[in-house]
Image (cartoon, rainbow, N blue to C red):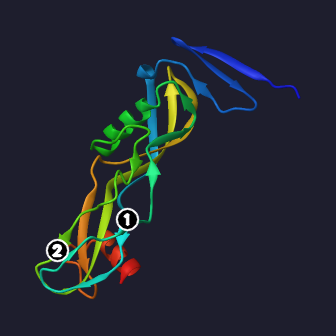
Amino acid sequence: MLKIATVAIAGSGILICSSACSATAAVSQETCTFTWSDVQDRDMLTAVSEAKTLAKGEKWVPAMRVVKSGVAQVTGVKLDKPHAAIASLRTRVGHALVPIGRTYPSEVSRGETSFGGAGRFVLYQVTPRLVDADFVVECDGKRLGSGHATSWQDDDIRGTAQCGVETLDDSRVADEALRMAC
């Protein structure tokens, strides 16, 4: 099988791609521009406990079940400095994002919990501001390719909700946890 390789010199680096691979950008990403589309920025439910009926002041160590996990990453076009895509996305969404390679949930909530009143309760964990976005990257005026980036704000949020009781903060994530556990 004959493989065709295309080599183009761009700025201070080289772009190399064979017919069997995606583009590898070795150009200086300082001169690159990322154009973002289909940017989704939302809180994501990552773990939920089973619902537990508790008396007032009763202590509980909930077992959390992971319902969604992921990794901060850049896919598609291969970049020498993929963190440049995350830095550009951070500017686009206006809040800090975790570096490539970080996983969520970072840890599943553990420990003893108690409530001020009696009821049937659920604990849940959220990865805040999970961002998924598509991009096109151009370096020195040349389109290198397209890709997808995933990252999130560096924090895990834990919450509680009571089965059969409307959530006060009108939280989509709390409602999802209640639907799963109650």
On-image quarter of the C terminus: bottom left
Please tell me in which quadrant of the rendered image residue 50 appears: bottom left
How far, Cα to Cα, is label 1 from label 2?
18 Å
On-image quarter of the N terminus: top right
Q: What residue did someone put label 1 on?
A: 47
Q: Earlier in the sequence, mark 1 or mark 2?
A: 1
Please tell me in which quadrant of the rendered image residue 180 appears: bottom left
Secondary structure category for the residue under label 1: strand
Residue 53 sits above or below residue 128 on the image: below
The image position of residue 5, as x and y in percent, is 75, 21
Residue 91 sits above or below residue 159 on the image: above
Residue in view at x 26 percent, y 70 percent = 61
The image position of residue 53, as x and y in percent, is 26, 86
The image position of residue 148, as x and y in percent, is 51, 44
Whether residue 122 sits left or right of residue 3 in the image: it is left
Q: Nearer the viewer, residue 68 or 82?
A: 68
Residue in view at x 23 percent, y 86 percent = 165
The image position of residue 4, as x and y in percent, is 79, 24
Q: Nearer the viewer, residue 37 or 100?
A: 100
Residue in view at x 37 percent, y 53 percent = 130
Q: What residue did someone put label 2 on?
A: 114
Q: Amino acid at mark 1?
A: Ala
Residue 39 sits above or below residue 87 on the image: below
Q: Amino acid at mark 2?
A: Ser
